[in-house]
Image (cartoon, rainbow, N blue to C red):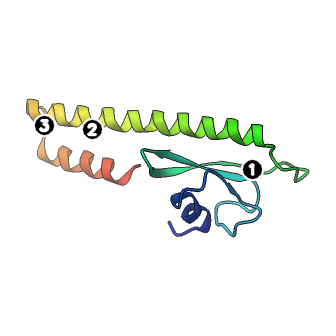
Amino acid sequence: MDDRAFVSLRGGATSVNLSNTPSEIRTDGVALPLAVGGVLHGALVVCGRPNDEAYDPDEIRSLRHLAHAVATALDAIRARRKAELLERIVDGTIAPEEIRAQAADLLRRP
């Protein structure tokens, strides 16, 4: 995705203020990277407040921790799915068509 918020997150930004960054995601709030091992898999997007009050640094820090926890959990789920697929391939308990379908799904999803 070439959205400016994602470009910033891929470039290493720890958060992106969507009020200051032209983005298709939202026009307010903050985006935080869902990244593990330096690989961006998505973003945690938190809408702005109704009164346009900015999030304070402690809140942003908490949101960063939450985003990291979510990214780590998603990465673990994906690793488990890969391991299960590999086990079924080795055991011979999966048809070639299913291997292709599951591998394609794993490659598509972060």
Nearer the observer: mark 3 or 1; the answer is 1
**Residue that carries the numbered disc 2 in the rendered image:** 82
**SS category of the residue bearing label 1:** loop
Quarter location, residue 9: bottom right
Callouts 2 and 3 close, C-beta under 8 Å: no
Q: Which mark is residue 47?
A: 1
How many marks overall? 3
Q: Secondary structure at mark 2?
A: helix
Q: CA distance from mark 2 to mark 3?
A: 11 Å
The residue under the point 36% across, 54% down is 108
Find residue 99 and report its horizontal and vertical position in percent. 18, 45
Three-letter code for the amino acid on which mark 1 is drawn? Cys
Q: Is residue 16 left or right of residue 48?
A: left
Indicate the secondary structure of the residue bearing disc 3.
helix
Of the residues shown, which amino acid type is indicated by label 2?
Lys
Position above or below: 62 against 36: above
Marker disc for residue 89: 3
Amino acid type, callout 3: Ile
Q: Quadrant of residue 69?
A: top right
Neighbor class of circle 1 (other Cα within 10 Å; few <14, some 14-19, many 20+) is some
> Whole-Å distance between the Cαs marked 1 and 2?
33 Å
For disc 3, the neighbor class at 10 Å (few under 14, some 14 to 19, many from 20) is: some
The residue closer to the viewer here, 46 or 99, is 46
Whichever of callouts 1 and 2 sits on the residue coming sooner in the sequence is 1
Percent x, y of residue 39 = 43, 51
Q: Residues within 10 Å of mark 2 (few under 14, many from 20)?
A: some
